[in-house]
Image (cartoon, grey):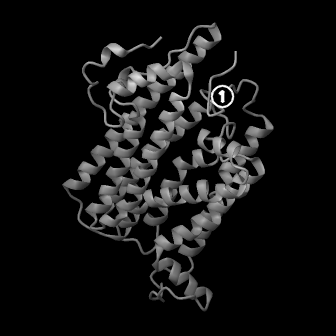
Amino acid sequence: MARSSAFGIEIGYPDLRDQPLLGRRNLLNVALTLWVPVPAILCAIVLFRWFPTGSTPPDPGLVWPGSPDQAAALLLHHPVLTANLFFFFLVDLQFWIIALVQRSSWLIDPYWTLLPPLLALFYIAHPLADPDWTRATLSIAILLIWSLRLTWNYFRRERWRFGHREDWRYAKMRLERRHFWLEQFFVVQATQHLMLVGLSLPFWAIAFRNVAFGALDVACFVFAAVGIAVARAADNQLDRFMLENEARRTRGEPKIPVLDQGIWRTSRHPNYFGEQLFWWSIAAFGVACGEPWVAMGTAFNSVVLAAVTVMTERRMLAVPERREAFEAYRRRTSVWVPWWPRQGAAGARDRH
């Protein structure tokens, strides 16, 4: 039986039964995943050890350095600039080259779970950092919990295969755009750069602004934990829904067109809501450190996610067997924030 498709892109879980876990493709992609951060990590270690402890020279200013020592001092005194330079030259370009060779931007997905912790640790481990360690410990701990949860969810969704499916948005662009090989550096790598480095900016404030730990920090931690819990519940329910529909397809039964049970009854995108609640809580840590500007990365991420929400819903509406049920679901259900279904629309439910 053919799979449903939207915009010419296969939807649902990929059939990976013929892709062995220890096959050459999977092992190669595992190696690529492990390799990508290595150059940046090594460069950070070299930079942090360039000068003996306590002997870092004064900031030479944002001028072209005249010597390796001056360059090292410049990079140490401007960690946000350094993070962006390392990310551009050692991550973005690698992602682009791998995508050109493999004709897939799959590597972005697993690195969404890995790059924020690496950036946060870059700031916290910086030799000039002077954080409030209670705030730093709690914020790093909740970030690592977020990363572990999202990593687990990604590989569960992919059935523990690496790189066997590209994000449908990029796959769609690859089919439609003749010069996507060039455009993808800006559409994929540069955009993800802004989002990931931007989301991680609060950890710069946490590392370099030693403000006393207080009630706002406690609230940030609690709301971040709630965001993780909401996203986890939504992803678990979505996983069960997708597996049930795969089982129905195998049995020759009609699929359930829309997930509208559990937390999905109160929000059309509860996983997005959980993620946004988490990242705005992290941004609030930066605000607690007296640096509200670091929330601009979170704001940019929210704008992008709003656009992704529109694209996702258009994709759902493009599937004929789902259109009617999803239109009814949209009429009665909140977009992001979980809320009670709208009165008068409940009778429109038609899940079969």
Look at the image and tell me whether residue 262 can be seen. Answer: yes
Furthest residue to the right? Answer: 24
Query: x and y percent of residue 177 in the render?
Result: 69, 49
What amino acid type should be assigned to the residue bearing mark 1? Answer: Pro
Q: Which residue is found at the position 65% from the left and 45% from the top?
A: 173
Locate the N terminus and report the quarter of the image it occupies: top right
Query: x and y percent of residue 52 in the render?
Result: 52, 81
Look at the image and tell me whether residue 258 can be seen. Answer: no
Left or right? Give the position of 139 relative to 159.
left
Q: Which residue is found at the position 47% from the left and 72% from the top?
A: 79
Left or right? Give the position of 76 relative to 135.
right
Kind of element beneath mark 1: loop
- Where is 199 relative to 67, above or below? above
- Where is 26 relative to 206, above or below? above
Furthest residue to the left? Answer: 215
Query: x and y percent of residue 277 in the render?
Result: 34, 44
Q: Which residue is found at the position 32% from the left and 27% from the top?
A: 266
- Where is 345 relative to 154, above or below? above
Judging depth in this view, the residue of 176 and 83 nearest the camera is: 176
Judging depth in this view, the residue of 297 and 122 nearest the camera is: 297
Which corner quadrant of the image does residue 246 belong to? top right
Give the labeled residue for mark 1: 14
Mark 1, residues whose alpha carbon is within 10 Å: few (<14), some, or many (≥20)? few
Furthest residue to the bottom? Answer: 66
Q: Which residue is found at the position 61% from the left and 59% from the top?
A: 186
> How many marks can you see?
1
Left or right? Give the position of 58 relative to 103.
left
